[in-house]
Image: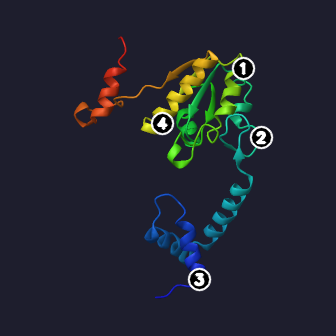
């Protein structure tokens, strides 16, 4: 059966989402058309509003609708001596869910990748340098992903910290709580052994 141009456009629009191929996009499009047109209209309105009004925090670069996000605007965190460096706004959410960290964040929106044209300027490292130059910042916590690019980014920022006289620490990586050694890959075990602590 031949589909109409508008249905084709709807299917193609869903395919911009990560992990959504042609079949998944068709399923979503037909579900909305057959069973939930009201939900589809609401989705389009909220999506439009979010694309128009969600921007980057002027200080930490996470997503917000205001000039400063709630964390940067919080009086209890305003003069924090710690800045946690993460790759994405989802990482901020993950750390916040632990309720352990009470400092500020800086969101890179990616990692260094010269092949893809992502250098220090694209990650806002000039802004981070500016933040670190304030006397209040005593420690930068590097919480980039444990990938080759994430490690390279952490190393680059650690060098920036050194030149500013700011302490740089790296989050621990290793065996997950509840994990069994026999199921853990060699790289993770190696990292856990090299990062061992006194008990």
Query: Mark 4 or mark 1: which comes first in sequence?
Result: 1
Query: Mark 3 or mark 2: which comes first in sequence?
Result: 3
Disc 3/disc 1 C-alpha distance (Å): 56 Å
Q: In the picture, residue 139 is in which quadrant?
A: top right
Q: Point out which mark residue 121 bears.
A: none
Residue at the image point whose x is 28% and y is 35% from the top? 184
- SS for dot 1: loop
User: Disc 4 marks which residue?
Assistant: 150
In this rendering, position of residue 20 left or right of residue 4: left
State the residue lying farthest toward the left. 182
Q: Position of residue 194 (x, y in %)?
A: 34, 21
Q: Point out which mark residue 67 bears.
A: 2
Query: Mark 2 or mark 1: which comes first in sequence?
Result: 2
User: In the rendered view of the protein, which quadrant contains the C terminus?
Assistant: top left
- SS for dot 4: helix
User: Disc 3 marks which residue?
Assistant: 5
User: Disc 1 marks which residue?
Assistant: 134
Residue at the image point whose x is 66% and y is 66% from the top? 44
Given this view, does label 3 or label 4 mark the residue nearer the observer? 4
**Disc 3 + disc 2, Cβ < 8 Å:** no
Q: Residues within 10 Å of mark 3 (few under 14, many from 20)?
A: few
**Disc 3 + disc 1, Cβ < 8 Å:** no
Residue 100 in view? no
Q: In the picture, residue 32 is in which quadrant?
A: bottom right
**Disc 3 + disc 4, Cβ < 8 Å:** no
């Amino acid at each position: 059966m031949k589909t109409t141009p508008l249905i084709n456009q709807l299917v193609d629009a869903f395919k911009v989402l990560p992990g959504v191929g042609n079949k998944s996009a068709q399923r979503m499009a037909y579900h909305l058309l057959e069973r939930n047109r009201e939900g589809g209209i609401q989705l389009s309105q909220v999506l439009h509003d979010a694309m128009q009004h969600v921007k980057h925090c002027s200080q930490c670069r996470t997503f917000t609708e205001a000039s400063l996000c709630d964390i940067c605007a919080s009086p209890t965190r305003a003069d924090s001596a710690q800045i946690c460096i993460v790759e994405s706004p989802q990482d901020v959410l993950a750390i916040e869910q632990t309720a352990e960290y009470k400092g500020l964040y800086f969101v890179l929106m990616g990692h260094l990748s010269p092949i893809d044209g992502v250098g220090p300027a694209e990650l806002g490292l000039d802004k981070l340098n500016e933040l670190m130059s304030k006397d209040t910042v005593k420690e930068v916590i590097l919480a980039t992903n444990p990938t080759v690019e994430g490690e390279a980014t952490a190393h680059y920022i650690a060098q920036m910290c050194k030149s500013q006289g700011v302490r740089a620490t790296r989050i621990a990586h290793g065996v997950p709580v509840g994990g069994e050694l026999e199921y853990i890959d060699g790289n993770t075990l190696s990292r856990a052994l090299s990062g061992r602590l006194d008990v």
